[in-house]
Image (cartoon, helix red, strand yellow):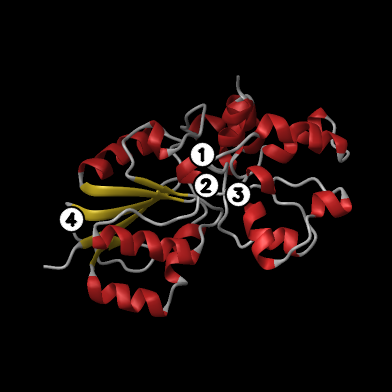
Amino acid sequence: MKPTLAVFKLASCDGCQLTLLDCEDELLTLAGEVEISHFLEASSSVAGGPYDLTLVEGSVTTAGDAERIRAIRAASRHLVTIGACATAGGIQALRNFADVDAYRRVVYAHPEYIDTLATSTPVSAHVDVDFELRGCPIDKRQLIEVLTAFLAGRKPNVPNHSVCFECKRRGTVCVTVAHGTPCLGPVTRAGCGALCPAYRRGCFGCFGPSGSVNLPALVPVLRRDGLDEGDVQRFLHTFNATAFDEELSP
């Protein structure tokens, strides 16, 4: 029998699931190697678990999410989280630094109908995760590598170094050194191909902290390049706010 694949969504924008659909030719090959048992973004046909490999997009933002991810984990032999929401809480984790009740009152006409947790947390804060694939959204090539690795029973070969390596490989001039542009490339995990620096823009940290990050050493450089304390916090509090915040914690 073919191994079974399931894809689930929690609180997210669906962008990482769309990356899987955007694989096109590779997805057709994958469909011939696995049984896609649950993937509502692609098909309404659903088969129950257990699943050999489960991909989960999105963060845990409600009590229902927390209960659901425990059920998904119980039905999955291997569980891989995909994207910044699932691996770091996502952009919605900005609530973690503020008063969620105040947000609820401002945004919704009837806040009493909104049932939400005070924080947005990664899946790994609630259940064991076999692998985290970072990015906002994830990289297509890395996704195919992870799927192939788990189907072959080996460890995924996904880079753990920083975006600076990618800049060097493509011959991109360092935007910080040459132009004084604030950039998170030195502390951000590779995977995007150094897209923003290639267009003379600083890295925004879409792929979260790299494996050997020294964020406290970068903060003075950001200040030197014109950011005050508030600017630094806003620069870090985007797609992977909680992950970078952990790196700054003593």
Which three-letter amino acid code belongs to the residue tagged 2? Ala
The residue carrying mark 3 is 162
Q: Give the mark, 2 or 4, whose residue is nearer the N terminus.
A: 4
Q: Give the mark, 1 or 2, whose residue is nearer the N terminus.
A: 2
* Picture disc at residue 89: 1
- In three-dimensional space, the C-alpha distance between marks 2 and 3, rounded to whole angstroms, equals 16 Å
Residue drawn at 32 percent across, 40 percent down: 69
- In three-dimensional space, the C-alpha distance between marks 4 and 1, rounded to whole angstroms, equals 27 Å
Report x, y in % for residue 168: 68, 60
- In three-dimensional space, the C-alpha distance between marks 1 and 2, rounded to whole angstroms, equals 7 Å
Horizontal side, residue 178 vs residue 37: left or right? right
Under circle 4, the secondary element is loop
Q: Is residue 94 above or below residue 204?
A: above
* Picture disc at residue 84: 2
Residue drawn at 76 percent across, 52 percent down: 202
Q: Is residue 43 above or below residue 80?
A: below
Residue drawn at 52 percent across, 54 percent down: 13
Q: Give the mark, 2 or 3, whose residue is nearer the N terminus.
A: 2
Report x, y in % for residue 248: 63, 27
- CB contact under 8 Å: marks 1 and 2: yes
The residue carrying mark 4 is 48
- Mark 3 neighbour class, 10 Å CA radius: few under 14, some 14 to 19, many 20 or more: many
